[in-house]
Amino acid sequence: MEQPNRTNTIGIFSVLVILTTLFWATQAAAQAPATSASRGSIVTNAYAQIPEKSAISIDFKEDSELNARLLPVIQEELREQGHTVSSDAPLVLQISLVIQSGPQPDERITVSGQGDSRGVSNARVSVKVDRNPKNQTNKTRYRLEADLIEQQTKPIWKGAANIAVGAGRDRKEAAELLVRSLLAELGTTVRNKAIVE
C-alpha cells in the first residue's frame, strides 16, 4: 500500500491553516459593531496664545437647523473655559460642520503561507471582506472645523475633528460630541488625538 507523501500532507495542512485564518477573520469583520460605535480623531494647531477671559463671537459658515441647535453647546463650552460670548467681539470662532452618509469601502485581508514544492509555496490568498453581510454598512461621517481668528485676519487657533458613526446615531448627539471634544482642545496643539465618549 502506498504511504501518504509527507510533503503533500504539509501542503494540505498549510492550506487548511490559511482557510481557517480567513474564516475567522471574515467572521470578526462581519460581526464588528456598526450601529452606534464611534471612531474619530482630532487635529489642532495653536498659532498664538488665547488671552484669559476673552470675548469671542461665533460664526457658522453654513446656516442649518443642526447648527442652530449646536450654538448653545458651543456657548456653554466657551463659558466653561472662562470666556464670554459677544456678537461684536474681536475674536471670531468660525465653525463649519460637514456630514456625509454612505457605505464604507470594502476591506481586504491577505494571508500568506509557506510550504514546499509539492505543497504550498509562498501561497498568498486575498479576500475582500464586507463588514456587513447585507451590504448595509451606511456609516455617517462628521467633520467639524473650527478657526479662531482676530480682527478677521490673524489666525489664533485652528482645529478639525472627524468621526464615523452608525446610521442610527442621533445627528445632534454625534455633532455635539465633536463640538465638545474639539473645543476641549481650544488653544492647544494636538495630533490625531482619539475622541473618547
Image (cartoon, grey):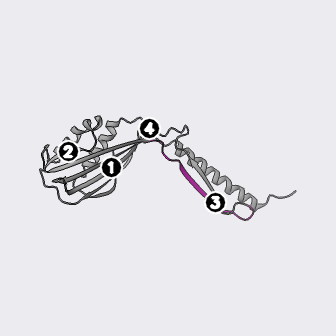
- In percent of width and height, residue 50 lies at 16, 55
Which residue is disc 3 drawn over?
113
- The answer for how far apart the CA atoms under marks 1 and 3 are is 40 Å
Residue in the foreground of this view, choosing between 94 and 175: 94
| On-image quarter of the N terminus | bottom right
- The answer for how far apart the CA atoms under marks 2 and 3 are is 58 Å
Residue 167 belongs to magenta span: no
Sequence-first disc among 4 and 2: 4
- The answer for how far apart the CA atoms under marks 1 and 2 are is 18 Å
Sequence-first disc among 1 and 3: 3
The answer to whether 102 appears left or right of 74 in the picture is: right
Residue in the foreground of this view, choosing between 100 and 165: 100
- In percent of width and height, residue 49 lies at 17, 58
The answer to whether 2 appears left or right of 134 in the picture is: right
Say which of marks 1 and 4 sits in front: 1
Looking at the rendering, the stretch of residues picked out in magenta corresponds to 102-118
Sequence-first disc among 4 and 3: 4
- Three-letter residue code for mark 1: Ala
Secondary structure beneath disc 1? strand
- Three-letter residue code for mark 3: Gly
Which residue is disc 4 drawn over?
35
Q: Which mark is residue 58?
A: 2
